[in-house]
C-alpha cells in the first residue's frame, strides 16, 4: 500500500459530501495529477509535493489545528463552530450558504429580541450561543444533530439556527429567516505552524496562487467583438478590461475588433448598451486560468 510522503504538504478535503465534487474539480483544474478510486483514504500527487487526505468535514478543522495535515478545504461554518486556532487563507467561491435564525411563519416573531427565554434548536451551538450573547438576547440553546428544521413543528423549539442556501428547506417547513448569523463558503485553512514554516509556506503559496488563478478566471469572460470605429472610444470606457482592451484593425476600415477580459456581471450590465452602440459579432468564452 502507498504511504504518505514525509516531504509532502498534506491537505484534507471532504471525503463524500456537498463540497467534494467542487473541491476535486478545483484540484484537477489547477493541474494536480493523482489517482483516485473508491474507498480511498488518501492520494499522492505525482506532479506537486502534496498528499490529499479524504475525511469527514467535521474533522478537518481539528486535523489542521493539530498539525495532522497542513491545509484543509472546508466550510467556514464548521471552522467557526470548531473554535480551532487555524488560519483562513483563501475563499474558494463555492459551497456558499449562511447560518440563519428562522421562525415559524405564523409565529409573528420578527426580531431575535422576541426569542428571549425561548428554546432555539441548532447543530451549531457554539456559534449560536455566541451570536445570542453578542446580541444580548438570553435564549435557551438546544443542540440537535440533524433535521433541526422540524423542531418548531414538534414543539421542541420556537426558532432554529440552521444553514440555508436556496431556502427551499425553510419554505418546506413553513419557516422564515429573521436574522443572519454567519455567511459561509468553502475556504482553505492552514495550520499556523505550517504557514509560518518557510519551506512549507513556499509550497502553500504556490498552491494558493493556482487556486486564485482559477477563482479569478471563473469570475471573468473573454469577450471579442467588432465595433464601429466611431463608437470605439466610448465602448472601451464602458468595458474596463484587465488594463486596456486589445484593439485590432479589421479588413473593413470602419470597424475595429476589440478583445478583452471582463467580469461576467459587468458584461451582462453592458451588453444591451454595446449592441445599441453598434457592436456586432460578440463572442464570449470562458477563461480557464487567469493571473493579474
Ligand atoms: O459526511 P460529512 O460529515 O463530511 O458531511 P455533512 O453531511 O456533515 O456535510 P454536507 O456535505 O451536507 O455539507 C458540507 C458543507 O456544505 C457544509 O458544512 C456547508 O459549509 C456547505 N453547504 C452549502 C451546506 C449547504 N450549502 C446546505 N444547503 N450544508 C448544508 N446545507 C443544508 C441546509 O442546512 C438544509 O438543511 O442543506 C439543506 C438544503 O438547503 P436549502 O436552503 O437549499 O433548502
Ligand atoms: Zn459533517
Image (cartoon, rainbow, N blue to C red):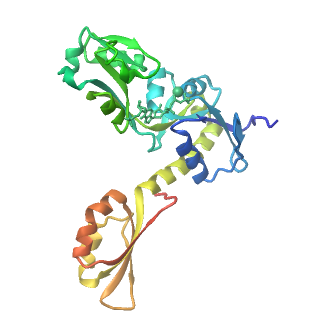
Relative to 275, residue 112 above or below: above
**Identity of the residue drawn at 39% across and 91% down:** 251
Above or below: residue 286 compared with residue 143: below
Q: Quadrant of residue 3?
A: top right
Point 36% across, 69% down: residue: 244
Q: Position of residue 201 (x, y in %)?
A: 60, 39
Quadrant location of the N terminus?
A: top right
Q: Height in image: 128 above or below 290?
A: above
Q: Can residue 278 be seen in this view?
A: yes
Q: In this view, does 123 lie to the left or right of 277?
A: right
Most distant residue in the right direction: 1
Picture quadrant where residue 277 is located: bottom left
> Residue 202 location in percent, x, y?
61, 43
Residue closest to the eye, 174 or 116: 174
Please state the horizontal and vertical placement of residue 273, each as a whole percent of the image. Answer: 23, 70
Q: Where is residue 210? Give x, y as percent.
A: 55, 51
Counting every numbered tag in the picture gives: 0
Q: In this view, does 180 lie to the left or right of 57?
A: left
**Residue in the image at 39% along x and 21% along y:** 148
Q: Which of 141 and 288 is in front in this view?
A: 141
The residue sitting at the bottom extreme is: 252
Asked whether 222 or 174 is in front, the reply is 174
In the displayed structure, 173 sits above or below 36; it is above
Report whether residue 30 is seen.
no
Amino acid at each position: 500500500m502507498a504511504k504518505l510522503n514525509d516531504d509532502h504538504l498534506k491537505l484534507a478535503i471532504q471525503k463524500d459530501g456537498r463540497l467534494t465534487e467542487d473541491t476535486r474539480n478545483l484540484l484537477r483544474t489547477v493541474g494536480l495529477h493523482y489517482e483516485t478510486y473508491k474507498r480511498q483514504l488518501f492520494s499522492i500527487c505525482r506532479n506537486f509535493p502534496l498528499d490529499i487526505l479524504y475525511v469527514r468535514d467535521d474533522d478537518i478543522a481539528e486535523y489542521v489545528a493539530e498539525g495532522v495535515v497542513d491545509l484543509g478545504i472546508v466550510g467556514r461554518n464548521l471552522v467557526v463552530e470548531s473554535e480551532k486556532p487555524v488560519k483562513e487563507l483563501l475563499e474558494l467561491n463555492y459551497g456558499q450558504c449562511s447560518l440563519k435564525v428562522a421562525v415559524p411563519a405564523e409565529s409573528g416573531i420578527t426580531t431575535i429580541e422576541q426569542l428571549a427565554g425561548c428554546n432555539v434548536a441548532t447543530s451549531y451551538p457554539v456559534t449560536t450561543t455566541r451570536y445570542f450573547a453578542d446580541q444580548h438576547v438570553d435564549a435557551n440553546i438546544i443542540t440537535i444533530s440533524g433535521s433541526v428544521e422540524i423542531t418548531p413543528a414538534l414543539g421542541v423549539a420556537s426558532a432554529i439556527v440552521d444553514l440555508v442556501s436556496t431556502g427551499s428547506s425553510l419554505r418546506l417547513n413553513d419557516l422564515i429567516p429573521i436574522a443572519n448569523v454567519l455567511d459561509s463558503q468553502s475556504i482553505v485553512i492552514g495550520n499556523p505552524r505550517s504557514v509560518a514554516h518557510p519551506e512549507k509556506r513556499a509550497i502553500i503559496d504556490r498552491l494558493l496562487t493556482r487556486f486564485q488563478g482559477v477563482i479569478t478566471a471563473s469570475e471573468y469572460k473573454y469577450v471579442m467583438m467588432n465595433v464601429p470605429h466611431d463608437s470605439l472610444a466610448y465602448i472601451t470606457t464602458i468595458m474596463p478590461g484587465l488594463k486596456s482592451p486589445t484593439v485590432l484593425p479589421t479588413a473593413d476600415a470602419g470597424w475595429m475588433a476589440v478583445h478583452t477580459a471582463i467580469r461576467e456581471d459587468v458584461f451582462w450590465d453592458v451588453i444591451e448598451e454595446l449592441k445599441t452602440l453598434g457592436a456586432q459579432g460578440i463572442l464570449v468564452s470562458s477563461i480557464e486560468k487567469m493571473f493579474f
